[in-house]
Amino acid sequence: MGDGVLDPTYDPTLEWPDNDEDAERDSPLASSSSQLVHSSPTFRLIVQATSILPRAQRLAVIEGYPEVQIGRDVAPPGSTTPRIRLKEMEVSKLHATIYWDDGRAEWGLVDMGSKHGTFHHRHHSGVSSDTRGSRLSPPRVASMPRHLQHLDTFSVGGTTFVVHIHNDGLPCSDCSRGDDDEVPLFTTKTFATSVHGKRKRDEESAYLPPDRTKDPRKALSLLKKSLLSQHPGEKLDGSAPTTWVDRSARRRAMHPPSPPLSRKQSPAPPPVPTHSTPQNAPTTSNPSTPEPVSSNSVGYRMLAKQGWTPGTSLGVPSEYTQHIVEPITVSSTSNRAGLGSASAVSPPSQGAGWREEGKQRLWSRLNS
């Protein structure tokens, strides 16, 4: 203090607490913060490529602010820090920050720990394999500050910015402002002031009564009462009521229903065949010894073509296998009845108790 060096921790409000306005005006810290914005050069961002910003928004004017944020979400309420909002999933809520370093007198870029990263490409480094440049930090890890130079590019998500820094304070022709071509740094558009919100309110107000209140609950109750109190056939737009048409009655008149179908009687069961053999029926003889295969049969000719001779067996003879020589005997099944046939069911016997009598009545009813 005695050598004329101003202590940076000194604040006149500690000595003169009653003179707050003069202390703030004469404080060296306040003077340095007020000169912070004015000492920084012209800093602007030109949108080189984007997948989310409108085509008309091509310029972001940063001078006048010591810091600007880039993220997917809007800035918290009451925040005075500008934010470039990129509404896409590859951009984190608070993705990156660009700030003015007064000690180094340069602009710096910091990745705030995003998942998909921030890529920076130095202008004088030449063409690299990755056009986006180098990544500032690994996923979900905040990076060290990266110094930005004139005509450097950095990418956040699907948007690439070109840095324009002019120490003389005059922008070039590329970064000059145009007609409504600036990227908004503060989100001031809300649902209440948007065109969509105004159209939505106009549509809702058309159904509300004129004496609606500002309370949404009361407005909703009034809307319900006004809609339920109207005539069922009256339309909301005031047009003529529509008459109800009974399409079911018209359809029944055009296509009368058919009379109910009578219950079909169960067909009478087939007569029970008897096991006695008719007198004129030919009797099948079961020979004890099989007859040799006739030379005129198809099987005989097929076996003969394969090298078979009568009296020999088919296949290669072996001591472990025994081949048949004579054909297999086919037994007749004409005298037997299969499962479920009518002949397999016999009528109940007489005098077998009340259960058998009930079965007999049921049997006679089914056969009638």
Image (cartoon, grey):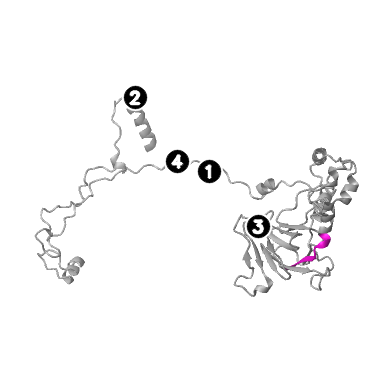
Q: Of the residues tagged 4 and 3, which is closer to the observer?
A: 3
Residue 261: mark in rendering: 1
- 105 or 129, nearer to the observer: 105
Residue count near mark 3 (Cα–Cα under 10 Å), binned few <14, some 14–19, many ≥20: few
Residue contact at pointers 1 and 4, CB within 8 angstroms:
no
Q: Secondary structure at mark 4?
A: loop
| Disc 1 crowd, CA 10 A, few/some/many (<14, 14-19, 20+) | few
Please, is residue 71 above or below residue 213 in the view? below
- Residue drawn at (29%, 44%) of the image: 339
Q: Which residues are magenta?
A: 37-47
Q: How far is disc 3 from disc 1 in space, using C-alphas?
A: 67 Å
* Helix, strand or loop for disc 2: helix
Camera-side residue of 245 and 79: 79
Q: Earlier in the sequence, mark 1 or mark 2?
A: 1
In this orientation, does residue 368 appear? no
Answer with left or right where residue 102 lies relative to residue 293. Answer: right
- What amino acid is found at the position of numbered circle 1 in the picture? Leu
366 left or right of 25 in image: left
Residue 33 position within the rendered picture, expressed as x and y whole percent measured from the top left: 82, 55
Question: Who comes first in sequence, dot 2 or dot 4?
Answer: 4
User: Which image quarter is the C terminus in?
Assistant: top left
The residue labelled by disc 4 is 265
Mark in front: 3 vs 1:
3
Look at the numbered disc 3 and give the secondary structure of its residue: loop
Q: Earlier in the sequence, mark 4 or mark 3?
A: 3
> How packed is label 4: few (under 14 Cα within 10 Å), some, or many (20 or more)?
few
Tell me the residue that label 2 is attached to. Answer: 354
Closer to the camera, 168 or 51?
168
Mark-to-mark CA distance, 1 and 2: 37 Å
x, y percentage for residue 321?
Answer: 12, 58
- In the picture of the structure, the residue carrying the numbered disc 3 is 89
Residue kind at label 2, given as amino acid type: Trp
